[in-house]
Image (cartoon, rainbow, N blue to C red):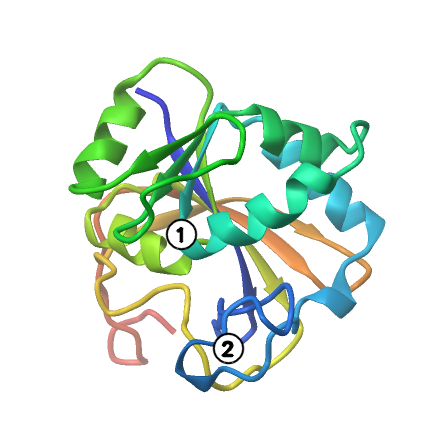
Amino acid sequence: MRKLKAMSFVSLDGVMQGPGGPDDDRELGFEHGGWAVPHFDQATIDFIGTLTAKAGGLVLGRRTYDIFAATWPLAEVDDPIGSKLNAMPKYVASRTKSKIDWTNSTLVSGDVPSAVRELKQVDGAELQVHGSIDLLQTLLEHDLVDEFHVFVFPVLVGSGTRLFGAGTIPAKLKLVDVTRFDGGIVASRYARDGKLEYGAMGPETGNW
C-alpha cells in the first residue's frame, strides 16, 4: 500500500488559500493572493523539486488542476518540476468538470474517498496532493493523508481558508525532519503516529 502525502504552503496563522498569485483563489472575497511568492528562493524551489520527484502520481482538486494545467505545460523541457508534473499520472477530483486535457490526467468523480483508497492500494511510488485545499479537507475527514509536508511562511494573512478545517480527525503526528530557508520559510515533515494522546500540566501534577 503506497502512502499519500500532502504538500501545503501555509501562513504562520494557518491560511492556505491563494499562495501563488492574486487570482489563484478569490473565494469569499479573498484579497491576499500571492502572499507566498516574495519568500521563495532557489534552494526552496530545488527542495520542492526533490520532493516532487518522489511522486508516482498526483491527486488534485479542480481549482489547483486548472492552475497547474494552464502553466506547467509551458515549462521548459529541462525544468525538473515541470517535466515531472507533465509526465506523471494525475487524478483530478471534480464534481463539475466533464473533460480534462492535461497529459496523463484522469477525472475522478463520484465517491472520491473510495477512489483515493483504491489508488493507495496500487503498487508504486507515493501519491502526492499539492495545494487542492477543498479536496484536502475531504481527505482529512476520511483519514486518508499519511504524511504532511508543510511549508510555513513568515506572514500573517488574517482571513482565508486554513489547512486544517473542522472535519480534521484528531491524531498524533511525528515530526520527521525540518528544513529552514533563507527566505524565512520553514518546511516540516510530519508522519501519522497513532491516536491523539492527552495529559495534564501544572505544578500539582509534577509536569512543570
Q: Which residue is mark 1?
A: 62
Provide residue 126's location: percent of width, then percent of height: 44, 26
Q: Going by the image, does 43 lie left or right of 96?
A: right
Above or below residue 125? Residue 180 is below
**Label ID, residue 181:** none
Name the secondary structure under disc 2: loop
Res 64 seen here? yes
Q: Name the residue at 75% across, 46% down.
A: 45
Res 149 seen here? no
Provide residue 164's location: percent of width, then percent of height: 35, 64
Q: Going by the image, does 54 lie left or right of 179?
A: left
Q: Name the residue at 30% across, 58% down.
A: 137
Above or below residue 111? Residue 204 is below
Name the secondary structure under disc 1: helix
Q: Quadrant of residue 39?
A: bottom right
Q: Which residue is mark 2?
A: 13
> 137 and 173: which one is in front?
137
Q: Name the residue at 41% across, 73% down.
A: 161
> 200 and 26: which one is in front?
26
Provide residue 202's location: percent of width, then percent of height: 31, 79
Quadrant placement of the C terminus: bottom left
Disc 1 marks a residue whose amino acid type is Arg
Q: Name the residue at 30% across, 71% down.
A: 206
